[in-house]
Image (cartoon, rainbow, N blue to C red):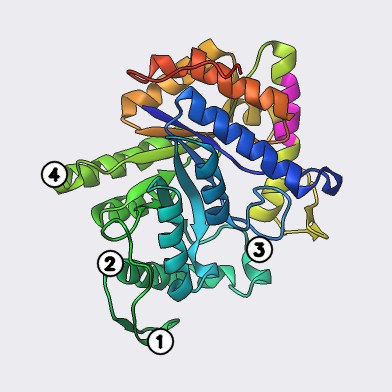
Amino acid sequence: MKFSVQLSADYPEKSYGGDSVYADMLEQAVLADQLGFDCVSLTEHHLINILMMPAPLQFAVKIAAHTKRVKIMTSVVVLPLHDMRTYAGEVVVADILTDGRLMLGVGRGAFAYEMGRLGVPIDETRERFDESLEVLQALLQDEEVSWDGKYYKFDPITIMPRPIRPGGPKLMMAVMNPEGIYHCTKRGFHIQTTPLAGNRQLLLDQVGAFNHAKDEMQDAGKDLTISLSRVGFIARSDSDRAEKLDLAEHYYSKFDNVFTGPGIVDSGMIRPLPRKQSRDELAENLLICTPTEMIDKLSPYAELGIDRVMLSVNFGVAQAETLDCIQCFAEEVMPHFETGSLVASAAG
């Protein structure tokens, strides 16, 4: 089982500055590269101060310029917000400038506030995503592509430059529903998923659907992978665990507002709202624990055959502690799951 660091921005105060936020994320990516993580991952979100990354392809190029081997995954880019006729070319350029290390995770969008403000109502995102994906694949695969659909109508075009890899970078589908996972796997997509609240039965159903599809595909599906996103952090003591849980609880009071709640945002800052989930339930669902406990919690994932765990450590923790967590995870947790991992010191 391999591991990724999710570089999800947290922007608690405008006075901190976007330059500082992205400098922190770049420093985390460089450390992950040095310590042998398989990849780092970037989300795409607009108009809000958590998960704040309106230009993931640009940042992927920046990361590639400062790292040597780590793959760079989008988790995810929101296809309905882009015009595939121009976005396909941007993907090709990013793939070239990242030396082929780009892994393109795609999704339909999750926050009604964000999608609505950008002119794509959340109830339209499924149809828009499906057509956008078909257009993107066609433009990356073929020359002189024309289209006559509901959202796209255009005469023959050829995106330039042409992809350096047949069909462009590896495509990964962000999907939670087990039935959706089954059908996306059967179509030849790698899968990104999460049980969110940590529901074990949902996780079993998600992985089961993926494995069932791969078994039916036989050799055609042997190289497909499933990546699981989880929020986690290495805690040094009970008091440290309690402090990190406080930060996570505050983070989720904002996340829930835009994910399942009313979407109340004040000049870009998401308003924290009371949560329905109890603190004890949150503590049970997140991976905030000691290295030994982390190994115990991750072992069932390896046994299920999950290929990659995407660890999200950015939920309001100070940068120095975040870097320490990434290094501790690499040195004390990763060796239990990865054969031949490069575990190097980040000391200068």
Q: CA distance from mark 3 to mark 1?
A: 25 Å
Q: Helix or strand or loop: what does disc 1 sit on?
A: strand
Q: Judge whether residue 184 is colored magenta.
A: no
Between residue 215 and residue 142, name the one nearer to us: 142
Q: Mark 4 and mark 3 in contact (Cβ < 8 Å)?
A: no
Which is nearer the N-term, disc 2 or disc 3?
A: 3
Q: Which disc is residue 141 wearing?
A: 2
Q: Which disc is residue 153 wearing?
A: 1
Residue 229 placement, left or right of 273: left
Between residue 31 and residue 234, name the one nearer to us: 31
Q: Helix or strand or loop: what does disc 3 sit on?
A: helix
User: Three-letter amino acid code at disc 2?
Assistant: Gln
Place of residue 345 in the rendered image (x, y in percent of width and height, measured from the top left): 54, 15
Q: CA distance from mark 4 to mark 2?
A: 24 Å
Q: Is residue 6 visible?
A: yes
Q: For label 2, count other residues whose C-alpha is less than 10 Å away and answer few (under 14), some (14-19) or many (20+).
A: some
User: Three-letter amino acid code at disc 1?
Assistant: Lys
Q: Residue at x 47, y 64 (%)?
A: 90
Which picture quadrant has residue 265?
bottom right
Which is nearer the N-term, disc 1 or disc 2?
A: 2
Q: Residue at x 39, y 29 (%)?
A: 2
Place of residue 285 in the rendered image (x, y in percent of width and height, measured from the top left): 57, 30
Q: Mark 2 and mark 1 in contact (Cβ < 8 Å)?
A: no
- The quarter of the image holding the C terminus is top right
Q: Which disc is residue 218 wearing?
A: 4
